[in-house]
Amino acid sequence: MARRKDLDPATSSRALVGEELRHARERKGLSQTALGQLLFVSGSYIGQMEAGIRRILPTMGPQLDTELGTGDFFTRHSKALAKSKYPDHFAEAVEAEAEATEIREYAPTLIPGLLQTKEYAEAVFRAYNPLGSEAEIDEAVALRLERAQILDHPTTPLLWVILDEAALRRPVGGPAVMAKNLRHITELIREHRIIVQVLPFAIGAHVSTDGSLKLMEFADAPPLSFVEAPDMGNLIDDPATVTRHTLMFNLLAASALSPQESLALIESVAEDYAHVEQH
């Protein structure tokens, strides 16, 4: 079966440019760390670019051409690769997500985008952009559902989600929408496609009370974490920070219900929503 990077032209282009970056760096006798120091980024960041997981930003193109003696190669290609269907603060995270072998996410208030149904996503985007046109909302929903296609592969990536109980109890779109989305999640669980745990209200304060958390691991590049706020996001490659975020996720998993208990709770809440809708 073809890998996703073979099927996605944008991802394939990043991989090819990343390979050229590796060759040019090695011709100059520079390590990833040494080149990173010249660009004021980490060696891990250079490794992510060489693996095609992170794009070469347009501001880096001229610097790379100067340091590596590559004419205007990286200047030209960095501008071309900067184009994305997603907002700037989210584009790199989506591109990394598509290449990840493992994704672990804690969702504090909403069902994560990869697990949202069309109706749930519509309700989220309409609430976020109440004055948006139907075309704008439809486009945003289509992109979200397109992202979720990475789950069409039977095994890759491994997706492990910790849902705060608030994400189950917040009636986004109404009872019928919630019942459908929660049943979609239980179907994926029963198909052994995803791992889901619920962090119950009874836990009280916890290690990530103030925000969401996403971790991504790759076959041939260092791991990343992603933190997000309205209209902004930060893809992090600093090893110490990624290690800290990994510990945070592990502590959340230790506090959450078991996968079996979580499945039972999600099914129960889905039935409650369905019952409300019927009456």
Image: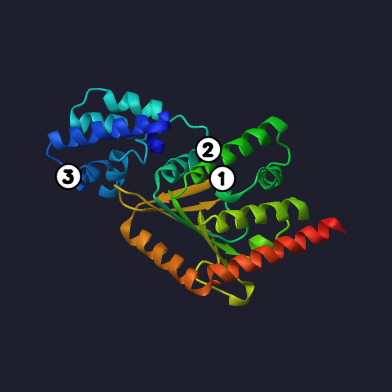
- Circle 2 or circle 1, nearest the eye: 2
Residue 153 in picture, x, y percent from top left: 47, 44
Residue 21 seen by the camera: yes
Mark drawn on residue 67:
none
Q: Which residue is denoted by mark 2 in the rendering?
A: 87
Please name the amino acid that badge 1 sits on: Asp
Q: Cα distance, mark 2 to mark 1?
A: 8 Å
Q: CA distance from mark 1 to mark 3?
A: 35 Å
Are the two marked residues, 1 and 3, in contact with CB atoms closer than 8 angstroms?
no
Write the residue at 43% across / 32% down.
8
Please report the residue visible at 61 percent of the width from the left and 36 percent of the height from the top.
142
Number of numbered markers: 3
Whether 179 is drawn above or below 126: the answer is: below
Residue furthest toward the right? 279
- Is there CB contact under 8 Å for labels 2 and 1? yes
Q: Quadrant of the C terminus?
A: bottom right
Secondary structure at badge 1 equals loop
Q: In this picture, is 246 found above or below 128?
A: below
First in sequence: mark 2 vs mark 3: 3
Badge 1 density bin: few <14, some 14–19, many ≥20, Cα 10 Å = few
Instruction: Determine the CA span between mark 2 and mark 3.
Output: 32 Å
Q: Measured from the top left, where is residue 178 in percent x and y?
A: 71, 54
Which numbered circle lies on residue 31? Answer: 3
Asked whether the viewer can see residue 172, the reply is no
Residue 231: image tag: 1
Q: Amino acid at mark 3?
A: Ser
Please state the horizontal and vertical placement of residue 137, each as a whole percent of the image. Answer: 67, 36
Q: Depth check: 36 or 192 in front?
A: 192
